[in-house]
Amino acid sequence: MQSINVVNIDPNEHVQITDRSMNEARRQLEVCNACRYCESFCSVFPAVNRERTFSEATITQLANLCHNCRGCHYACQYTAPHEFGINIPKVLAEVRQNSWQDNAMPAFMARAFHRSGAALAVAVVIGFALLLWLINQLPQSLNANTGEGFYSQLSHNAMIAIFIPAFLLPVLAIAISVRRYWRSVGGTQLRLCHIKAALASAAKMRNLAGGSGEGCNFEDEDRFSNARRWYHQATMIGFLLCFAATSAGTLMHYLFDMQAPYTLFSLPKMLGVSGGALLSIGTLGLGVLKLQADRDLADRRVWGGEMGFIILLFLVSTSGLALYVLAASAWLPELLAFHLGSVLAFFVLMPFSKMVHGFYRLAALLREQQLQQ
Amino acid sequence: MIQQAKTYDLVVIGGGNAALCAAITAAEHGSTVLILEGAPKPYRGGNSRHTRNFRCMHQKPLAVLTDRYTEEEYFEDLLKVTKGKTDEKLARVAIRGTEESYAWMEAHGVRFQPSLSGTLSLSRTNAFFMGGGKALVNAYYRTAAKLGIEVMYEAQVTHLERSGKRIEAVEFTHQEQSHRLTPKAIIVASGGFQADLDWLASAWGPAAKNFLIRGTPYNKGVVLRDLLDQGAESVGDPTQCHAVAIDGRAPKFDGGIVTRLDCVPFSVVVNNAAKRFYDEGEDVWPKRYAIWGRLVAAQPEQVGYVIIDAKSLELFMPSVFPPIKADSIEELAEQLTLPPEALQNTIEEFNAACRPGQFHPTELDGLATDGLSPAKTNWARPIDTPPYYGYSLRTGVTFTYLGLKVDETAQVQSAEGPIENLWAAGETMAGSILGQGYLAGFGMTIGTVFGRIAGKEAANYAKH
């Protein structure tokens, strides 16, 4: 994994890298536009074919539309050693990454955590230590060990006091950065039909289907496989189920005065356990596939940060499941601190990690719907 | 020379579409097969890498193919482009074989896509490969691996040892060592000779040294020449090649589809003395692009220059390199290294000969010059709206016509009758069917159909 000293990157050098990726993407897309063989793989190439020249806004939008399925790369007759040296998955990954980092607030945080798995790990350790300290040290009056279950370790109010800002502030930061993106690519007023079509595309991961439904060329050169698509679906659905579980719990707590711990057949538990299982399986699969895939068909700078993010999600979900299984164990305080600490790290780093890809992808799919009309 | 210990029923020479169709078919008929591909792995697949579709007859809508395309219509299209220079029996075998080949290709991993944007005119006749020819080649190599077919890359066949009616041995080099194999049967599917510029020059004249080769640099015709030298019968005009006008900045080899330039009908084309030499508006571009290869080849230094103005920039498919751009004709001439005054005169003379009328970019509009020689008979609009754009044009060779003569079973013929354990498929025998001209997607038709025939015949032979 990379060290975290990339925080000190020279801002001028960063601009040069951004320009270099942008110019290289433009050169390559002009070759694609003269060829067009890849038109049916995904949404990127029909969008390329609508253009005559490629502005920075167009290239940024195309980069966020690309899901790195790599079908185009293995099909391309102009990849290295050919002198045209086409590598669309890589160059678009670089432009995409730059757009996430440059639109983030503050950008230096994004540069650090996107790139460095080690930085993510440090954040998790800090989160763990903080939570453990809180559990052990919070004054009895505040912590009031009166609650049941996990609240016997850390009161509901204490959890809320930590996690509401730790969730809302990052969400706000993401909203601002995606809004910047939306403006930069010329997005206009959204209509219901755009939203429906974009969500349908995301739900089916249509852009990882390789055009024929046989999937990506990801883990074994030009072999088509839906493994990445299914693992990504498991991750995405698992995450959404966990989110729904938390939301259901919050509603039950405040609206219906039904307080945790909940039984297995309650809404939060059923959503949370199934979501946690899916998230664990999905992230494990994505991590294994990422080890097998050719690293030169992506942005090499962020391999560590991306892997770190997958591991972080895996730790969040498996530690959550472990809490469910080991609720009565003597290790409960440590386990709870680890789970909540990793969740905290995950939330706080959302605007600066791979997590933003979901928001940007959705924005790109929405914009593509607008452009198609 | 290393005598290979392992023996194979069949050795396939070449690694493109025809070779793979042959190898896969033979393996499915029980043969042990070795493919000797001359190129390294990243360049495997010969000119098939650059293809994008195959022309397919069908009685009713078939997957991505619309409407119907009958054997008769297909054959008539072939007659038109070859001006009758075809072997009807072989041509009909190829045409009839396509309908059933579509399903065979899908079953062996090829995926099709609807007609590409800008090629809607082909949606009825040509099935496009998803991702193009390299994706097709990749799929076939995967299938071949599953069938236990062995592939040796960078294996350059140097000699087939003929003894009477048989080929006794295959000699090739691999990793700087010479090898010798004695399979029961051999299939030659190693393309034409267009990458051998000396051979091209001896057929065409020294001008050929300035030609660009649109496809693989590995098709040097070594096996073709070796067999012809040993009495295999040839077919096709040895002096001819299929040549089109492409962007002059294209690489010497392997530029492929992206180097084409579709703007000639909307332009003025001059030679390096800034003089026009042919009617740019004679017909719609798909019917004329192939003659421009020869026209440019006949000009000094085998180069031409296309001049358009801002009005026409978006009327044609974008090409791989951006055009040279200038605010005046003089400045454009300087950038294109043309004599500025001469170009200025040519454009002024052309503009003065243009007549008012309706301009229709997609049809013959009859908008012709008046009193100009050579005339421009359609789309003649003055070049008068800056900025002006220019491209250089060179001759790009797609393939050669000279090949091995085969019968309907793809068996290679000699003066003494068929060579009993030798078959040929693809570009190396296409001259039998395609005597001149070209029909989009027909190369892949010949490769697929005759590849499968050759594979089956060779496998049956090897069983005995």
Image (cartoon, rainbow, N blue to C red):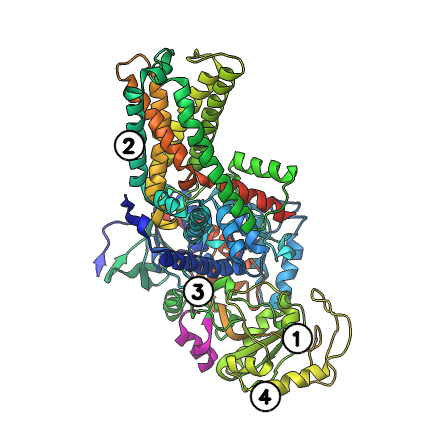
Q: Give the number of the disc on residue B254.
A: 3
Query: What whole-number distance in Å separates the C-alpha atoms at marks 2 and 4?
Result: 76 Å
* Residue A35 location (% of width, % of height): 52, 59
Callout 4 amino acid: Ala
- Neighbour class for label 4 at 10 Å: few (<14), some, many (≥20)? some
Q: Indicate left or right for B454 with B368 as reference.
A: left
Q: Is A121 placed above or below B366 here?
A: above
Helix, strand or loop status at disc 1: loop
Helix, strand or loop status at disc 3: loop
Span of residues in magenta:
B192-212
Query: What whole-number distance in Å separates the C-alpha atoms at marks 3 and 2?
Result: 54 Å
Callout 1 amino acid: Thr
Front residue of B75 and B48: B48
Q: Is A114 placed above or below A161 here?
A: below
Callout 2 amino acid: Val
Circle 3 marks a residue in which chain?
Answer: B
Q: Is B224 placed above or below A251 here?
A: below
Q: Which residue is mark 4?
A: B342
Residues at marks 3 and 1 on the same chain: yes
